[in-house]
Image: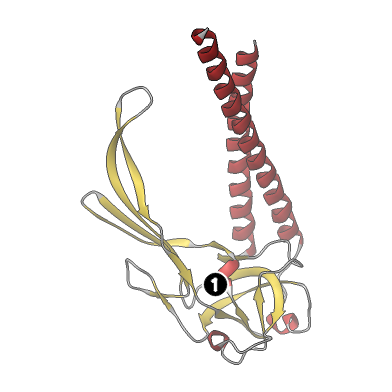
Amino acid sequence: MFGGTAVLAVGIGIGALTLGGIAIGGYLIVWGLNGFRQGISVWRSDPIPIEESHLTDGTIEIEGTAETLVETASAPYSGRTCLAYSAKKQRKEREKNDDGEWETNWNTISSPSGSVPFNVVDDTGSIAVDPEAATLGMDGEYSNRSGDIKYSENRIDPGDEVHVIGQKRSVTETRPELDDATEYIGDGDAAPTFRVTDGSELETVVRMFGRSAASIVFGTLIAGMAGFMLLDTVA
């Protein structure tokens, strides 16, 4: 009696686990397909001169030079002045894998990030960007290792060329960090995505396609393995 109950409990547990795997895999596939759709939307549009952005509503896509607006951020490990950063601190640790063998992994201890509003400038004008809710595509600017600890930073620095796509928004209340700007590019439902990339439009699209492809592949593997386990359990 107890043996049958235990087998049933194990079967239910495996079934729940495999269904969860299928759900997670499906989510990753859908996320990746949506990313491809957004990437195609960005690729089909072209950046406009910044002076025209002040006459345009809805989605805004621009390219230009990132410059300090009011404040700057300080990258945590290099101490460099920047406009946005994503950092990571990792520790090298030895762990046993599923086969009981020892292997070395770099485990993340902390991953601080930060950003401040900044100006984007081209030959025709400038406009403020508030990157707080943006997906940031930044190049690796700093890497250092001390013993078993490794530090890395991706940053957008003043003077970097950036590509921005987002929604033009009006400043409806006093925001000292935006100085005297009356409008800025930020997040909003009118834009297919809000991204700030250290580089050109092409680099933005390549990053989007790369992330989407990885999500689809990973999701397919998870869903496939979970589906195989479910069929094997049912059989």
What x and y, as percent, mark residue 153? Answer: 39, 62
Residue 206 can be seen, yes or no: yes
Q: Nearer the viewer, residue 113 or 125?
A: 113
In the image, residue 66 above or below residue 45: below
Residue 73 falls in image quadrant: bottom left
In the image, residue 67 above or below residue 6: below
Residue found at the far left of this picture: 147
Figure label count: 1
Residue 86 falls in image quadrant: bottom left
What x and y, as percent, mark residue 42? Answer: 71, 60
Q: Residue at x 30, y 25 (%)?
A: 101
Question: Which SS class for mark 1?
Answer: strand
Amino acid of disc 1 = Glu
Q: Residue at x 61, y 60 (%)?
A: 204
What x and y, as percent, mark residue 54? Answer: 74, 84
Q: Residue at x 60, y 33 (%)?
A: 20
In the image, residue 230 above or below residue 82: above
In the rendered view, does 148 fall on the left or right side of 118?
A: left
In the rendered view, does 158 fall on the left or right side of 222?
A: left
* Quarter of the C terminus within the rendering: top right
Counting other residues with Cα less than 10 Å from the Cα at mark 1, is it few (<14), some (14-19), or many (20 or more)? some
- Its colouring scheme is secondary structure
Residue 112 falls in image quadrant: bottom left
What x and y, as percent, mark residue 175? Answer: 58, 86
Residue 155 can be seen, yes or no: no
In the image, residue 43 above or below residue 100: below
Residue found at the far front of this picture: 1
Q: Nearer the viewer, residue 70 or 226?
A: 226
Q: Which residue is mark 1?
A: 161
Q: Residue at x 63, y 69 (%)?
A: 164
